[in-house]
Image (tube, rainbow, N blue to C red):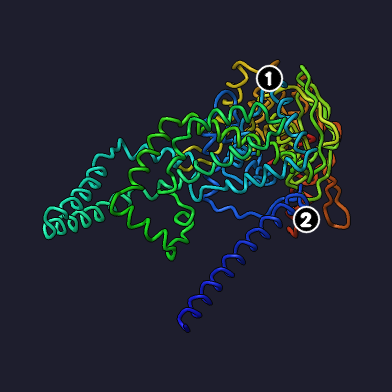
Amino acid sequence: MEYIIFVAAMLIFILILMIKGYLDYQREQKDFIRQLYDDYGTLPPREYKPEQYDNISRYFEKHRKGFFIDDITWNDLGMDEVFKKMHYTYSAAGEEYLYYTLRTPFQNKEELEEREGLIDFFQTHPKERVACQYLFARLGRTGKFSIYDYLDYLDDLGERSNLTHYAAIGAVLLGIGALFVNLPLGLFFLICAFIVNIISYFKVKGEIDPYIVSFSYIFRLREMTDELCGKKIGALFRETESLLRASRGLASFKRGSYILMSPARMSGSGSGNVIEIFLDYLRMIFHLDLIKFNNMLSEVRKHRKDIDEMLEIVGKIETVIAIGAFRAGNAWCVPVFTEKKEIHAENVYHPLIADPVKNDISTERGVLITGSNASGKSTFLKTIAINALLAQTIHTCLADSYRTGMFRVLSSMSLRDDIISGDSYYMVEIKALKRILDEISGEGNPVLCFVDEVLRGTNTVERIAASAQILKSLAGGNCLCFAATHDIELTRLLREEYRNYHFEEEIRDNDILFSYKLMNGRSSTRNAIRLLGIMGYEEEIVHRAERLAEDFLRNGSWSP
């Protein structure tokens, strides 16, 4: 009687734990859904490990075509950090497609208008948005590798056959049959079959375990897309039609997948589960999961295009939701596109600056910006470049208004020596500028380029002479160039090709103050030498430098 009471108490305790676990899970899901409603536009906290962040670019690497933002421009503009500012995605498909979107600006208005339609829908339909985000969160990520890495790794497995596994099953069945003919011999044969099957099982299982992650993600992807299609969201009619078509191709992939990927097995929680223990022995003896793995592998190879299409569509949907969330957290406008080579922006600002100074710009020809160090030249160039890129990718600009033509965006700004190739700074710089000139001569929309301190890696005379000619070439019919320089001489040499703007600073009470406001005309202040005094240099050094500079400005040559 006491034994029965003990067993009953244990069963009740286990049941209570199961009910508590279920209720906790339900509460967590409700809290998450409420958070999706309440925190719309609030960037979720994330930890970016180097190996995980590297995977975000895999979809882009597999699908880049036509014009895309090259590595130099991407790094010049600090676009990794900009990406993190709009990383409102919850699935690997979403984050990889968002990265792809930022590196692949559309070159026509029609595609952007189509994207705007979905962005606007999810901005104004919170119920549908949250329903989709919940599904994307359940789809989740793939761990330390991209799903495209896993799919590539599947090719390393080569051609696989189930003949040896069927032979293993046959050996067990033969042993069972032999029991009825000769019990001792049958028992011996059956034990040998068990031992051989278990040893060969673990050898093969060790080979395939790392690849099951990709199958698990594809399985979740198919389940999630079926649920998404079941919601019948009108704005996603075309997307759901394509998802259903692709999903049907993977029907046999799902059948019988439990034997390979039972929930308890995939979560690692099945070690104490009686059913899972029994299934594990069946797997080891009959190689059931190895057979299913080979069948699923064949299906994946056969339907790579369907899987890729599903990842693309899911990524697109989550990307437009992320764009809407980014808008909710910032002051923004929808850009207006024209057929002209122009940029007109009011109160445009940089997305990475906490309290930015906003500026206006209106130009249909090249812009040359002068001013002292730290006055805001480089930041302004990046502000315009990033907004030009955002205009043609997420159809969103950080400004009160933004009117522009369609461009191919390139830059040559934050360059450095290339130790690996042995190129000096000057060589790296002229190669970067040459790629812009080559792009201008190619087909497509005009080039919008940004150059910071052109040819700073060489001497003054040659720098000014070469810079003037390069910047003239960049001011041609198929290019709009924004350039920053310390060389005031260029403002005179290029006055026909470029409009002059500048940033000013004010020295007050032995301190330097920057307004970061863009002003018309060339810079007229000379404060670089005065800054030496502010920073504590000896007065004699400062005075001698001032006299030397004044003598050069007066005579046009340097005194010994």
**Residue that label 2 marks:** 533
Mark 2, secondary structure of its residue: helix
Identified by mark 2, the residue type is: Gly
| Horizontal relation, residue 213 to residue 86: left or right | left
**Residue that label 1 marks:** 446
| Nearest to the observer: residue 241 or residue 149 | 241
Q: Quarter-wise, where is residue 421 in the image?
A: top left
Bin the neighbour count of mark 2 within 10 Å (Cα to Cα): few under 14, some 14-19, many 20 and up.
Answer: some
User: Which image quarter is the C terminus in?
Assistant: top right
Distance, label 2 to label 1, CA atoms, is 46 Å
Q: Residue 125: x percent and y percent?
A: 78, 39
Q: Residue 321: x percent and y percent?
A: 70, 39
| Nearest to the observer: residue 435 or residue 165 | 165
| Horizontal relation, residue 284 to residue 146: left or right | left
Question: Mark 2 or 1, which is nearer the eye?
Answer: 1
Mark 1, secondary structure of its residue: loop
